[in-house]
Image: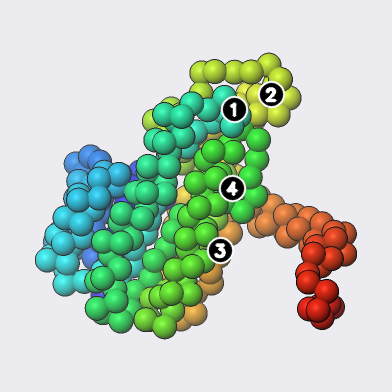
Amino acid sequence: MTTWFITGASRGFGLEIARQALEQGDRVVATARKPEQVEEALTGYGDRLLALALDVTDEAAAVSAVAAAVDAFGGIDVLVNNAGRGVLGAVEETSADAVRAVYDTNVFGLLHVTRAVLPVMRNQNQGHIINLSSIGGFSSVAGFGVYCSTKFAVEGLSEAMRQELAPLGVNVTIIEPGYFRTDFLDATSLDVQERTITDYAATSGAVRDAVPGLNHAQPGDPVKGAAAILAIAAAEAPPLRLQLGTDSADEMNRKVAQLRDEANAWRPLAVSTDHDEVPAQN
């Protein structure tokens, strides 16, 4: 029986992952700022569900929640860092307070929980950390630059942790969803900046204008996305990255091709900066 620790489990991907894990007979520690919402949404699972209050920006609270999970279930097999928030606006339009708020949750919050869980997984010599990023963590877009930068940070941390933890029996996977029909674009999750600058009307402004029409009309199905995440958790050799949704997979291919073309075009200048005594690399 697998024990899951899921942040942001009161809605969206977090809630659906918790539901499907419970349905397959696993134990779930489902954390949220309002755990009563988890309990209302997930009934009938008895003592296999432990709903805990957790604001991931509070490091001491993360340590306490992990301790409660271990006390209840004896360990943690899968950590799903799902809690997150968004901010919409050009980089220049986004206030310092808004930048700090999204970093506090998406980056520092993920670090708080991960650091609290890792001693448990190292002691077990096994575990799997699944970090919810976004295709925006690989390919940024106007209007979501600050949000995407938090997911770039998550991806950098995850790549390093995969190397650090692999010898210790702990896997790390980055999940890169495209647009999924969750409430991420609702006002409860997405902070739309009030300040607008006319010069950005054709770029970030166009994205801002398009968002209301996308909300709850996104192509991705959260139920299928959660099922894919459960499949990754059960895989013998899980990937470092998994894109979810055709839009995400297509954007990944486009960005990879662009990076390859640009690197090839500018390679002569790149390699020209070596010391003369270093043999040129072909």
Which of discs 3 and 4 lies nearer the camera? The answer is 4
Which of discs 3 and 2 lies nearer the camera? The answer is 2
- 1 or 2: tag closer to the N-terminus: 1
Where does the image place residue 160, in percent across and percent down from the top left? 49, 68
Q: Which mark is residue 200?
A: 2
Residue indicated by mark 3: 242
Kind of residue sitting beneath label 3: Leu
Badge 3: how crowded within 10 Å, few (<14), some, or many (20+)?
A: many
Marks 1 and 3, how far apart at CA: 31 Å
Kind of residue sitting beneath label 1: Glu
Marks 3,2: beta carbons within 8 A = no
Question: In which quarter of the view is residue 74 placed?
Answer: bottom left
Q: Where is 234 relative to 56, above or below?
A: below
Secondary structure found at label 3: strand
- 4 or 2: tag closer to the N-terminus: 4
Kind of residue sitting beneath label 4: Gly
Marks 1,4: beta carbons within 8 A = no
